[in-house]
Amino acid sequence: MAEAESSRGDPDREIVRDAPQNVEYDTCFGVILIDAMSSFNSNGGNKIAPVTMQRYDDMIKLRYQDSNKYAGILLTPVLGKILDDFSVKYEASLVGSLSEPTPTRKQKKGHDPTRQRKCCVRVVVYGLKEEESKVGDLLSDDGLFLQQPSAAECLRNTNYSNPHYLVRPGSEMPAVDRHQKN
């Protein structure tokens, strides 16, 4: 698995570093929902599209997993900071939007047929149990809060432990229902 690292010079060039070989991500912290500008159109029937995340300084470029074509952009610097400071990985999917597309500058001039629209990106965050609260603190300081992932989103070999979930004394974190239907 590769993680994106900052590319300070050329914004179209990605520098990728290999994740440490000995890191076993043991915990799914949950899923964060982030708005992105994207050309994703769910009219073709696909309402969800898996994407890869490529970091460029404070931006994250999204690319479709199947074609590696541009899918959108996230302006969420905290995700890069977490990559720098902790052993984490992200898995993301674009969720189709019902919103009207926003014309780009080129479109207004009649040059570009691509339309950008606001789409939701579901980012599943995996990491090490001992870093859970620090990752959760950074996310909440930036106004991002982890939600419970669906069974399909959470890898089978990881435990689910959400630092933002309030558990009453004597209670336990709810398990991700591995048998639920999506």
Image: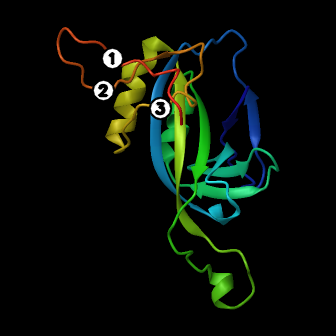
Q: Position of residue 116 (x, y in %)?
A: 61, 70
Q: Which residue lies furthest to the bottom in this view?
A: 109
**Marks 1 and 3: in contact by CB < 8 Å?**
no
- Taking the image as shown, residue 150 lies to the left or right of residue 115, namely left
Q: What residue type is labelled 3?
A: Pro
- Taking the image as shown, residue 26 lies to the left or right of residue 175, namely right
Q: Earlier in the sequence, mark 2 or mark 3?
A: 3
Q: Quadrant of the C terminus?
A: top right
Q: Position of residue 80 (x, y in %)?
A: 55, 39
Secondary structure of residue under mark 2? loop
Query: Do we see residue 75 in this rendering?
Result: yes
Distance (Cα) linking label 3 and label 1: 13 Å
Crowd class of label 2 (few under 14; some 14 to 19; many from 20; radius 10 Å): some
Q: 108 above or below 131? A: below
Residue 149's disc is 3
Q: Residue furthest left?
A: 169
Q: What residue type is labelled 2?
A: Tyr
Determine the residue positioned at 36% across, 38% down: 145
Mark 2 or mark 3: which is in front? 3
Distance (Cα) linking label 1 and label 2: 8 Å
Residue highlighted by disc 1: 173
Q: What residue type is labelled 1?
A: Met
Crowd class of label 3 (few under 14; some 14 to 19; many from 20; radius 10 Å): many
Q: In which quarter of the image is the N terminus?
A: top right
Residue highlighted by disc 2: 165
Residue 12's disc is none
**Marks 2 and 1: in contact by CB < 8 Å?**
yes
Q: Where is residue 9 in the image (x, y as percent from the top left)?
A: 72, 51
